Image (tube, rainbow, N blue to C red):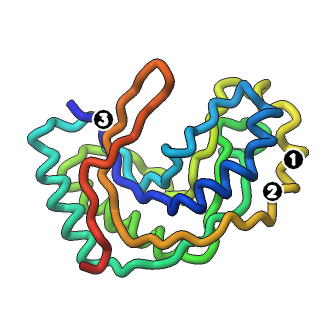
């Protein structure tokens, strides 16, 4: 079985900007499990454990989606806590310009995955880039007072021009994500 998800990656300059801007928070809140820079991405659909033989089907479906969606620009901005600051579980960056296109892309991915993944996931898709995970609310005590500093931050604009099927390998130092298949959008 291969732990798999479909997502998009960020341009390296955006990842560097996020890492630089968050270095203070990482130092101030060391108990938060911060996502490694190379693992920052946006998940469109988590597929879970997939049989290796089924990967070909997934690659084919993703190729079909790629032909129907044109590339677009996506702005990365703000830092927030999910689900909210009273019960924080995730530190994330939000999206601005291009969010409508991103939601449409995720809808296409979700629709095609319904053909081969049995999912009862009824949550409304909320585009975000996970930056850190909070195991205990006490790990984020005082974090809320820093959010206003990141409310209007603009990390930059990334081109969304490909879909990526990732393999996620869990290890002692957290998950490692490796691209298994990439599809250019609009081709």
How many other residues sit within 10 Å of disc 2, few (<14), some (14-19) or many (≥20)? some
Residue beneath disc 2: 150
For the residues marked 2 and 3, what is the alpha-carbon distance in whole angstroms?
A: 33 Å
Report helix, strand or loop for mark 3.
strand
For the residues marked 2 and 1, what is the alpha-carbon distance in whole angstroms?
A: 7 Å
Q: Residue at x 63, y 35 (%)?
A: 34
Left of 89 or right of it: where is 103?
left
Residue 109, by quadrant, is bottom left
Report helix, strand or loop for mark 1.
helix
Left of 15 or right of it: where is 168?
left
The numbered mark, 2 or 3, whose residue comes first in the sequence reads 3
Q: Position of residue 181 (x, y in %)?
A: 24, 54
Instruction: In the rendered structure, find residue 146 and report the number of the disc placed on it.
Output: 1
Q: Residue at x 16, y 46 (%)?
A: 55
Do the residues under discs 2 and 1 have CB atoms within 8 angstroms? yes
Residue beneath disc 3: 3
Instruction: In the rendered structure, find residue 54 and report the number of the disc placed on it.
Output: none
Tally of numbered discs: 3
Q: Is residue 72 above or below residue 28?
A: below
């Amino acid at each position: 079985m291969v732990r798999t998800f479909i997502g998009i990656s960020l341009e390296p300059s955006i990842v560097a900007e996020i890492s630089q801007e968050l270095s203070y928070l990482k130092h101030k809140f060391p108990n938060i499990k911060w996502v490694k820079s190379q693992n920052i991405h946006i998940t469109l659909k988590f597929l879970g454990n997939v049989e290796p033989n089924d990967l070909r089907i997934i690659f084919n479906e993703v190729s079909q989606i790629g032909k129907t969606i044109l590339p677009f620009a996506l702005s990365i901005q703000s830092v927030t806590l999910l689900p909210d600051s009273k019960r924080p579980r995730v530190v994330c960056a939000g999206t601005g310009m291009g969010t409508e296109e991103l939601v449409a892309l995720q809808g296409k991915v979700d629709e095609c995955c319904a053909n081969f993944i049995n999912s009862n996931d009824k949550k409304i898709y909320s585009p975000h880039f996970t930056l850190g995970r909070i195991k205990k609310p006490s790990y984020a005590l005082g974090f809320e007072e820093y959010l206003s500093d990141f409310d209007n931050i603009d990390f930059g604009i990334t081109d969304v021009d490909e879909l990526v099927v990732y393999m996620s390998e869990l290890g002692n130092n957290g998950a490692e994500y490796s691209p298994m298949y990439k599809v250019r959008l609009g081709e």
